[in-house]
Image: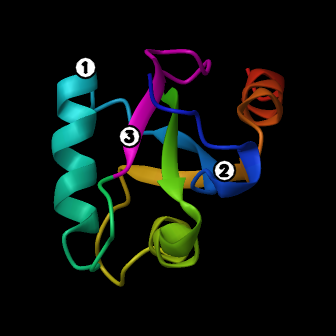
Amino acid sequence: MAKRLSKALRGKRRWIGLIISKDIASRTQLATELTQILSVLDLSNKPRIMDFNLNQISDGRSTGIIEVKLSDYGAVRDLLTTPKLGVKSVISSYTSSGKIKLVRERLSEIV
């Protein structure tokens, strides 16, 4: 059996908490939209959707969490934080952390 990598040798990652427009009603729609938005970046790995909570916020918007590699974090966060001119943002970054538990706590506070 192969020896498991120590924690220090595993890949570093960041968790990004998202506010998602009410136009997106499923996890697959979110994946499609994320792929489309992030296609302008040259990412080492595709971000992984960890959570998708439909209609969690009172005005019909949803929340979600994605996992990105540390090397891709800055570019992804900048793209999701700054809206493009003339384009309505359907996904925006709300919070981020190196611990998913903290991101979940922060997203639960905005309900």
Disc 3 element: strand
Residue plotted at (41% across, 50% down): 91
Within-10-Å neighbours for mark 2: few <14, some 14–19, many 20+ = many
Image quarter of the N terminus: top left
Amino acid marked by disc 3: Arg
Amino acid marked by disc 2: Tyr
- Which residue position holds label 3? 48
Q: Which mark is residue 26?
A: 1
Within-10-Å neighbours for mark 1: few <14, some 14–19, many 20+ = few
Disc 2 element: strand
In the rendered view, tell whether residue 92 sits above or below residue 56: below
**Left or right: 97, with 38 as reference point:** right
Query: Of label 3 and label 1, which has the lower sequence position?
Result: 1
Query: Of label 1 and label 2, which has the lower sequence position?
Result: 1
Residue plotted at (54% across, 43% down): 18
Q: CA distance from mark 2 to mark 3?
A: 17 Å
Disc 2 and disc 3 in contact, CB within 8 angstroms: no
Disc 1 element: loop
Q: Which mark is residue 94?
A: 2
Q: CA distance from mark 1 to mark 2?
A: 19 Å
Amino acid marked by disc 1: Ser
**Magenta-drawn segment:** 47-60
Query: Of label 2 and label 3, which has the lower sequence position?
Result: 3
> Image quadrant of residue 110?
top right
The image shows residue 13 at horizontal and vertical percentages of 61, 53
The image shows residue 98 at horizontal and vertical percentages of 75, 49
